[in-house]
Image: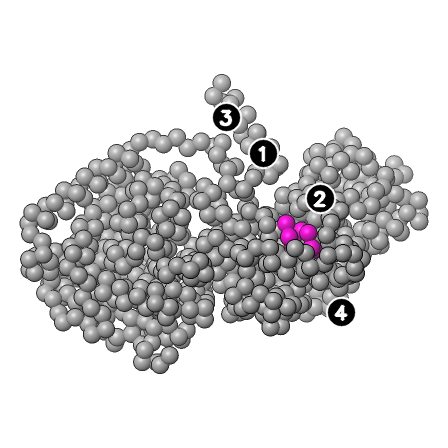
Amino acid sequence: MSTATGPGELSLAQALNAALRDAMGDDDRVLVFGEDVGALGGVFRITDGLTAKFGEERCFDTPLAEAGIVGLAVGLAMGGLRPVVEMQFDAFAYPAFEQIASHVAKLRNRTRGALPMPMVIRVPFAGGIGGVEHHCDSSEAYYAHTPGLKVVTPATVEDAYWLLRDAIADPDPVVFLEPKRLYWSRERVDLTTRSAGPMGRAAVRRAGTDATLAAYGPTVPLALQAAEAAAADGISLEVVDLRTIVPFDDETLMRSVRRTGRCVVVQEAQGFAGVAAEIAARVQERCFHSLAAPVLRVTGFDIPYPPPKLEHAHLPTVDRILDAVDRLQFDDEPDLRHTGMAA
Amino acid sequence: MRLEDLLPSPEPVRFVAADGTGTASHGACPRPADDRLVEGYRRMVLGRRFDTQATALTRQGRLAVYPSSRGQEACQIGAVLALRDDDWLFPTYRDSVALVARGLDPAEVLTLLRGDWHCGYDPVATRVAPQCTPLATQTIHAVGLAEALRRNGTDGVVLALIGDGGTSEGDFHEALNFAAVRRAPVVFLIQNNGYAISVPLARQSAAPALAYKGIGYGIGSEQVDGNDLVAVLAVLDAAVAHARSGHGPYLVEAHTYRMEAHTNADDATRYRDDDEVTRWAAADPLARLRTYLSDRGLIDDEAVRTAEAGAEAFAARVRTALNADVPADPRTLFDHVYAEPTAQLEEQRAQLVAELDAREA
């Protein structure tokens, strides 16, 4: 059963809400809980109306303790339920990290499959909304670096719905990172059908021939804007929306890069030891002989997330992406900026 | 709930004194039936022999490490006897004796310490969660599973074990709070053995007793002489009945003592003196119960010999099982990371298999 039964305009937040409602309607084992998710419907209203529809046994407020929330989910999953928990903000999830890293991620492995951990940990993440400190962290690398977790981030309204449905149905624990700045983006969608592949597959959002932009979550719309701007200058950029960071879809990205011969990876998080670094390494390992230029990264700076009035200076922009594209040696001039050989 | 209902007794509940003489039963807790105490004695003898055997196996290199619970047998066996088969136990790394006393295969219990894998038994089949190494994290899992039992329409109860040091961890407090707010059928048993590795209780907590930690969360609490099986079982019976009947969680602190060092790799002489150990040896839970049961005519020399022979046979089985070399296949490292291996894990497995094949060729 699906709430959104036909074409209509929805925000990404509403699509997430519909996914939770439909998943709870389809499977009595699905429970939604966290801080302020009941009467309030969550600070971003993602759980709006769920308690009213399904009752407090199915969608409930918990004490304000993130390790407790995730730990409770571990026990419930051991008992055959399918918890979907909300961490109120990215940085508020850190108290739960031990539970996530030591138990959620490992219990299947530690018990040779006897205790799978089907659960979804929803995390509103990243910046761009003028949030004060501790509300704008891009924490994906911590989770992606933890074997046993799947890490998903939607960038479109349709993906918000279907990737969350996939995540809830998945037999493994999924950290579901919701780009806060896209919550209010609206699209006309028909949620009865899906155009992109399942969780675990990347999607080519715009076809191009000169270079590949790899992006995920909040930077996908940015990459599409950059591709649009580049097209005006006669440069054809392909945009790959990674959708799922773990498991990573090497195939789709490598197929694109082998064809274009150039790649820029765009992420909002600080760059050092981040997901973009892993992707850049994978591309050069697999596509070295197809590459006409080094794989470049456009990322946030290696600083704590800035205060609201300064975040614009930190966040990747269309111009920064276009600057990186300009450095992809289309004129056969080597880019010596990081080589120590620059004049 | 009234404050008086939450407060533990001012002194630990005790039925049997250190010299084995019985004292008046505690008002709120009936004395457990004789046959359960006799069965408790049998399992304590077996548990102690298992513990000694496991420590010996570390010296022979068969186990990487073993955290002994010698001296804590009344808690270990009391916890097991208080539970029905369909109840769940959430143990720590120091609770192997409770696991074998519950009937788990000793080789499967010791898999973790032998190093073949992490959890060697099936938690679902045994209703025993994996022995937990990160302190106190299992207590909140216990709350979740207790809630799942209630949701699934059973009257099952969960017993979560924790040590004195673990009560300082945040997860313990979150577990108490969640359990109380959600009225989960869970019993928390603190085995206060005096030390967290080397740190004595006085450096751990300024509370009058750890049992008082329940009050702030609205949880009824009791403290008990942890070296008196009769008292431990009586108090846990009451706590389990409280949880099973829908009254929510209960907290029990058992005062006991870890007779051995933290593990075979620890040196307890650096942080406690022999006099203290000697004093606690006089409060030994096994000798106390044996005297108590003998004096009441519930066991005789023959029963003692039978229990000890059974324990000896069990130790021999443990030795045989642990002396066998079980091949650990590196090819299985990629199993059970996810329900289905990712493409990347398949690549890595192929790489490892090629390495192993080349080595074996």
Residue nearer the viewer, A313 or A128: A128
Task: Measure how far apart labels 2 and 4 are at the Cα level.
Answer: 38 Å
Which residues are drawn in magenta?
Answer: A160-166
The reply to the same-chain question for discs 4 and 1 is: no
- Residue B317 visible at all: yes
Q: Amino acid at mark 4?
A: Lys
Pointers 3 and 4 in contact (C-beta within 8 Å): no
Q: Amino acid at mark 1?
A: Glu
How far apart marks 1 and 2 lie (CA) works out to 21 Å
**Residue occupying the far right of the picture:** A233
Dot 1 falls on a residue whose secondary structure is helix
The residue carrying mark 4 is: A309
Give the residue number, with chain letter if any, for mark 3. B356
- Location of residue B229 in the rendering, given as x and y in whole percent from the top left corner: 20, 60
Counting labels gives: 4
| A78 lies above or below B59 | below
Chain of the residue displaying label 1:
B
Q: Relative to residue A135, is residue B45 drawn left or right?
A: left
Counting residues from the start of the chain, the first of labels 1 and 3 encountered is 1
In which quarter of the view is residue B190 placed?
Answer: bottom left
Marks 2 and 1: in contact by CB < 8 Å? Answer: no
In the shown orientation, is residue B260 left or right of residue A35? Answer: left
| Residue B361 versus residue B48 in the image, above or below | above
Which part of the image, by quadrant, shows the N terminus of chain B? bottom left
Mark 2 or 4: the one toward you = 2
Q: Which amino acid does the dot numbered 3 rest on?
A: Leu
**Closer to the N terminus: mark 2 or mark 4?**
2
For the residues beneath circles 2 and 3, the answer to whether they share a chain is no
Q: Is residue A339 visible?
A: no
Instruction: Return the residue nearer the eye: B47 or B128.
Output: B128
